[in-house]
Amino acid sequence: MFTFSDIPMFFVNFFLILPLVTLIHEAGHVLTARLFGGKIKFCIGTGETLFNIGSLEVKKKYFMEGWCQYDSLTYNKTWAHISIYLAGSGFNLFVILLLNYLITTQFLPATLFFYQFAYFSIYFIFFSLFPYRNDEGKPSDGMAVYDVLRYGKAKDPID
């Protein structure tokens, strides 16, 4: 049951954990695309731009969504594009497993923060890999993988 005592953790989840999960997810796409020689632009949030740091753009509603665009891959192969689309969820899963290892070795304490982080990461992985298009027609990572397998890779599906 949700009570008034849960409100502070709600704000921690919404304004800290969820954006952190999104940043880790997008970092997976960015690092993998760079590994294949791509030029990167990525964003955390929606709305007006607050600031830019290199190729990262942080928007006013930083706690909502994120995206990564890439082009000019050195290795422009189907498997490279699939790897890039799956890398976000892969990074989320890696961080969950790393945190669990650090908790089981008692390097980190077993706190609600880490539990919530793992919960939101699993949620993020599921909806990222579930194949669908949003209201603007932009694909999830799962749909982007499907599109690459079915139609080949001509351009970034976010364009």
Image (spheres, helix red, strand yellow):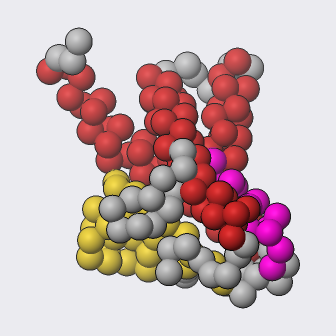
Most extreme residue toward the top, as rendered? Answer: 1
Q: Quadrant of residue 97?
A: top right
Most extreme residue toward the bottom, as rendered? Answer: 72
Q: Give the residue drawn at x 33%, y 62%.
A: 135
80 up-or-down from 108: above or below: below
Most extreme residue toward the front, as rendered? Answer: 150
Q: Is residue 141 left or right of residue 120?
A: right
The quarter of the rendered structure image containing the N terminus is: top left
36 up-or-down from 119: above or below: below
Q: Is residue 94 left or right of residue 116?
A: right
Q: Give the residue drawn at x 41%, y 45%.
A: 18
Q: Position of residue 61 (x, y in %)?
A: 28, 62
Q: Which residues are magenta?
A: 76-89
Task: Identify which residue, 70 or 17, lies in the foreground.
Answer: 70
Q: Position of residue 93 (x, y in %)?
A: 66, 39
Q: Position of residue 42 (x, y in %)?
A: 52, 73
